[in-house]
Structure formats: structure tokens, C-alpha cells
Amino acid sequence: MSDSNMEAFQERLDRMSAIFSDIVSHAEEQSLTRCPYRNRFDLCTALFRCRNQLPVADGDPEDLACGHDGTFDYRTAWESNPRAVQKTRERIVRIKRDAERRRRGRRGKTDDR
Ligand code: SF4
């Protein structure tokens, strides 16, 4: 490659590096306020529970809107331990079932009087 071609090549490489570094810094900056799970329709695409998820008024019942307003760190709203959440849900169901069983048992005793 001739010297002039080498210089032109290097100029193009430098230009591409500058463009990509601008894109990377913009993405880094935006990632602090815009959740990566929020799509362009402002719907949440996460497959986990987040406190910012909101039901969509007139949309598909499966859809959840993102209620994050970009003024705080959205990552603290994520459930960090899905297994613990699942265990807690199962425990709540068990407690409700046991309470219902006890209530039914008490009602049966009072009905017998
Ligand atoms: S609801 Fe939560 S997980 Fe979903 S897009 Fe918004 S901040 Fe992200």
C-alpha cells in the first residue's frame, strides 16, 4: 500500500473510531436512565417482576407498561432473587390455604352447636 493510501486508510479508521466511541458513550449514558427491557412502545419486555411494571389500559392483558420516569436508577426495582420471590409466593399460598382450612374447621364446630 502506498503512503497516501495508508494515510487515507488511517484517516478512515480514526473517523470510524470517533463515530463508534460517540455511540458507545451515548449508549452508556442512556443505560443509566433507560432500562434495556423497555421497548420503543414503552412496554416492558422483562421476564421477571419489576416494581415499575404497570398494566396497560386498552392493550393486550399480557402487556405491561414501564412506569419508570427516568429520574432514578431503575435497577433497584428489579427482583434480585426470583427464587426467594417464588418461595415467598408459595408460602403465602400455603398460609392462606391453612387459614381457610382452620376457618372452615371453626365454622363446622359453631354450626354443630
Ligand atoms: S418496568 Fe422495570 S424492567 Fe420493565 S422496562 Fe421498566 S424499569 Fe425495566
Image: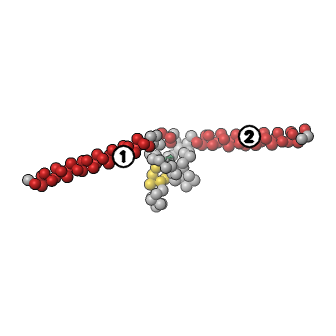
Residue sitting at x 28%, y 48%: 96
Where is residue 85 drawn, in percent x and y? Answer: 40, 43
- Could you say which is closer to the camera, residue 85 or residue 11? 85
- Tag 2: residue type? Ala
N-terminal of the two: label 1 or label 2?
2
- Residue 52 shows in the view: no
Q: Going by the image, does 1 lie left or right of 43?
A: right
Residue indicated by mark 2: 18
Q: Quadrant of the N terminus?
A: top right
Q: Quadrant of residue 55?
A: bottom left
- Tag 1: residue type? Arg
Residue sitting at x 78%, y 39%: 14
Mark 2 within 8 Å of ligand 1, using the beta carbon: no
> Where residue 89 is drawn, which disc sits there?
1
Residue sitting at x 56%, y 40%: 32
Q: Residues within 10 Å of mark 1 (few under 14, many from 20)?
A: few
Q: Going by the image, does 96 lie left or right of 46?
A: left
Where is residue 45 drawn, in percent x and y? Answer: 52, 51
Where is residue 8 drawn, in percent x and y? Answer: 85, 42
Mark 2 element type: helix
Q: Residues within 10 Å of mark 2 (few under 14, many from 20)?
A: few
Tell me how far mark 1 sits from mark 2, CA to CA. 50 Å
